[in-house]
Image (cartoon, rainbow, N blue to C red):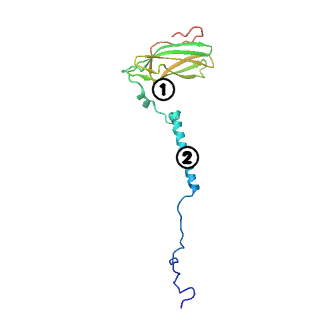
Amino acid sequence: MAGAGGSPGERPAGGPAEGSEPGFALKLGSSGRDRDYLRIGAGVVAAVLIFGIALFSFTDLSAALLPMEDRYLEILLPRTEEGVHPVALNELTNLVEDNRISITGRMTNASLEPVENVVAVITARETTGRFPETIEVPVEPPLIEPGESGTFSVAVTLRQRPDTYTVRFRLQDGPFVPHSDERGFSIDFQQVPGPLAP
């Protein structure tokens, strides 16, 4: 005869089977706080991406972090006849007054195609040679057809009396453009009132 608790091996109807663990229920789903965190995280990621795109698009950071070698930029140079430089420097005058030098020049597009946004890169040095000053000035007009000329003008103030300077050309946001000097001059700085003899 079974006792009050029933015979051995018997369990109340509806109870868990023998050898099984007590049952439990797991409710899936995220709380409102979790959803808020997800929205905040997505907003932060989007803001960082937008800032990075703007930084690379409107600054020179990409060129600094990912510099291109000259041989890759040479494809941007205008085509020329064999043995001819794309740019010819035709005129160059300068005037020195105290520590200030004013430089004016004219160049010609000697290539076979129009060139745009040419920049004259002028580096001036004073008598000590310790504090060179480099200034970039656009050549006007911005578009120069083959055989046509452009001009540039700039004034540079140095710490000491100017001694020498150099002129180079490059395409805006591009490589330096080889040029030929068709003046055949040597610079010998003199003080005002007369300009330097070419």
Amino acid at the residue labelled 1: Gln
Label 2 or label 1, whichever lies nearer to me, is: 2
Q: Quadrant of residue 30?
A: bottom right
The single residue placed furthest to the left in the displayed view is 82
Estimate how packed mark 2 is, as few (under 14), some (14 to 19) or many (20 or more) residues with alpha carbons within 10 Å: few
Q: Residue at x 55, y 17 (%)?
A: 164
Q: On the rendered structure, is 136 left or right of 74?
A: right
Q: On the rendered structure, is 180 left or right of 39?
A: left
Q: Residue at x 53, y 39 (%)?
A: 52
Q: Circle 1 is placed at which residue position?
A: 172
Q: Could you say where residue 169 lies in the image, as x and y percent from the top left?
A: 48, 22
- Whether 106 is drawn above or below 20: the answer is above
Q: Could you say where residue 50 lies in the image, as x and y percent from the top left?
A: 53, 40
Q: Could you say where residue 83 lies in the image, as x and y percent from the top left?
A: 38, 20
The single residue placed furthest to the bottom in the displayed view is 1
Q: Residue at x 54, y 13 (%)?
A: 94
Evaluate if marks 2 and 1 touch, with contact meaning CB atoms under 8 Å apart.
no
Amino acid at the residue labelled 2: Gly
Counting residues from the N terminus, which is met first, the one under dot 2 or under dot 1? Answer: 2
The single residue placed furthest to the front in the displayed view is 32
Q: Which mark is residue 158?
A: none
Out of 144 and 101, give the one closest to the viewer: 144
Secondary element type, mark 1: loop
Q: Circle 2 is placed at which residue position?
A: 43
Q: How many marks?
A: 2
Q: Residue at x 58, y 22 (%)?
A: 133
Estimate how packed mark 1 is, as few (under 14), some (14 to 19) or many (20 or more) residues with alpha carbons within 10 Å: some
Disc 2 from disc 1: Cα separation: 37 Å
Out of 162 and 64, give the one closest to the viewer: 64
Secondary element type, mark 2: helix
